[in-house]
């Protein structure tokens, strides 16, 4: 990280919701005057999903202090919410804010003087006391070709491995009208692709009048914002996919043919011990049914390797589900016990076995991805350019393309791949 003289620098870890919230935080901190401080301010928006994510955040904080000795360093996000005193005890940190406080300008105006004690440094409320998720309007997402829009926060489920409800609180939805207005605002500002995001997005609407579901929200956005070219969903829980959502997948070409599923395991016993609400056959059937509705749709998934009590046979069920569901974009998490969760108290799999299984899963995912790349040879693709020379297809596959500015959608033909990305040529070049 380069030295900060003045201004607000936000360092984001973790999910797409954090990316969206970081833009709100930047605006709030600047309006509170942090950008005018001598030395500037560095805000870390942390993730608590794994112990490794917390370790990386602490490492980055120490590095930032070495490189920016005069900067004010503020730590917030899920890790700050779940273990505030651990961050407050760091000499490098000036202020710790909870997930509710981080979005308010007044929280940054209360930045204490140097040398305060740990208790004064930590300003973190009870996240379970938060009942609503306000709409925070942003005009842009800095450095991004696509824009993220929050539709929901928190989670009412208590998966045995997950610390996130303690960082985010209970599920609460952004009112549908506010979501539509934010999408319209970003679309009018030139964003061709909007990504809807949340902690447990398929629970959207349960706390709103009339209990609208995610599918109704998607259809309403596409109807009321005709100029939005591409609408994408972040991670969903397939067991909660409603009929309107499935209908939108089947009939709305502007809804991108890419779903990232929160599977976590391919073994029924492990799924029960995780307190997940689906079984392996339901996941496989969901993927089969959706492919019939939208041929060519691309699936990604989160899978945990080495969950407590996982035997070799149980793990092999997770290996097989990569092929059985036809997964292309795999996110593999070696199990990481999080203090305070039931899974941390279960009989643990040896760390070397966890690492080996994670490597095997990643290898299976890489093989599936290369097969996917090969299958796209010769196809025509619409590619959203993310930065010079790189973009994403509608199915979220990385592609090299030598035309187009960031944020522009270009039409291209896939001429091959290099094992990591598609190689695409503009249609005009093909015609020539």
Image: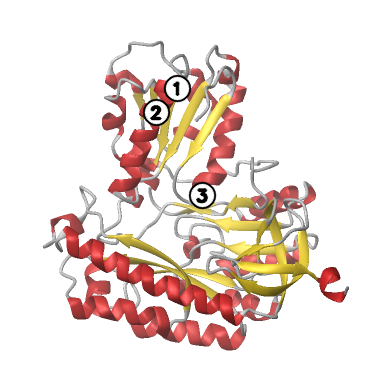
Report which residue position mark 1 lands on: 67
Element on which disc 3 rests: helix
Badges 1 and 2: C-beta atoms under 8 Å apart?
A: yes
**Nearer the observer, 427 or 330:** 427
Residue 390 placement (x, y as % from top left): 66, 57
Left or right position of 2 against 184? left
Which tag, 3 or 1, sits closer to the chain's start? 3
The scheme the figure's colours follow is secondary structure
Report which residue position mark 2 lands on: 63
Q: CA distance from mark 1 to mark 2?
A: 6 Å
For the point 47% across and 63% down, the residue is 203
Disc on res. 17: 3
Q: Nearer the viewer, mark 3 or mark 1?
A: 1
Residue 91 visible in the picture: yes
Q: CA distance from mark 3 to mark 2?
A: 25 Å
Residue 197 placement (x, y as % from top left): 54, 56
For the point 37% across and 58% down, the residue is 156
**Nearer the observer, 16 or 238:** 16
């Amino acid at each position: 990280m380069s030295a900060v003289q003045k201004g607000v620098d936000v360092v984001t870890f973790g999910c797409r919701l954090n990316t969206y919230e970081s833009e709100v935080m930047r605006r709030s901190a600047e309006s509170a005057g942090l950008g005018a401080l001598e030395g500037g301010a560095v805000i870390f928006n942390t993730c608590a999903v794994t112990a490794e994510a917390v370790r990386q955040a602490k490492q980055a904080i120490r590095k930032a202090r070495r490189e920016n000795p005069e900067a004010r360093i503020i730590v917030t996000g899920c890790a700050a919410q779940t273990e505030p005193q651990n961050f407050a005890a760091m000499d490098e940190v000036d202020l710790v804010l909870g997930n509710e406080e981080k979005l308010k300008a007044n929280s940054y105006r209360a930045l204490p003087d140097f040398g305060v004690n740990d208790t004064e440094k930590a300003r973190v409320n009870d996240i379970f006391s938060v009942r609503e998720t306000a709409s925070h309007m942003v005009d842009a997402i800095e450095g991004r070709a696509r824009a993220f829009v929050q539709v929901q926060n928190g989670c009412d489920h208590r998966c045995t491995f997950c610390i996130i409800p303690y960082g985010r609180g209970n599920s609460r939805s952004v009112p549908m009208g506010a979501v539509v207005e934010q999408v319209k605002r970003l679309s009018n500002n030139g964003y061709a692709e909007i990504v809807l995001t949340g902690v447990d997005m398929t629970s959207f609407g349960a706390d709103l009048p009339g209990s609208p579901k995610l599918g109704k929200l998607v259809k309403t956005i596409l109807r009321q914002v005709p100029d939005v070219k591409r609408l994408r969903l972040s991670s969903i829980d397939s067991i909660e996919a409603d009929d309107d959502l499935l209908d939108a997948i089947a009939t709305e070409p502007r809804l991108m043919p890419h779903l990232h599923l929160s599977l976590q395991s391919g073994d029924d016993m492990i799924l029960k011990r995780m307190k997940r609400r689906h079984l392996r056959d339901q996941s496989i059937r969901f993927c089969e049914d959706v492919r019939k509705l939208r041929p060519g749709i691309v699936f990604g998934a989160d899978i945990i390797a080495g969950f407590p009590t996982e035997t070799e046979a149980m793990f092999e069920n997770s290996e097989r589900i990569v092929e059985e569901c036809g997964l292309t974009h795999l996110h593999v998490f070696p199990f990481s016990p999080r203090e305070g969760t039931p899974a941390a108290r279960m009989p643990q799999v040896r760390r070397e076995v966890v690492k080996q299984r994670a490597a095997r899963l990643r290898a299976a995912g890489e093989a599936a991805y290369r097969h996917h790349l090969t299958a796209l040879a010769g196809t025509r693709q619409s590619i959203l350019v993310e930065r010079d020379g790189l973009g994403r297809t509608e199915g979220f596959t990385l592609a090299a393309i030598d035309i187009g500015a960031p944020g522009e959608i270009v039409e291209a033909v896939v001429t091959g791949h290099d094992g990591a990305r598609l190689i695409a040529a503009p249609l005009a070049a093909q015609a020539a």
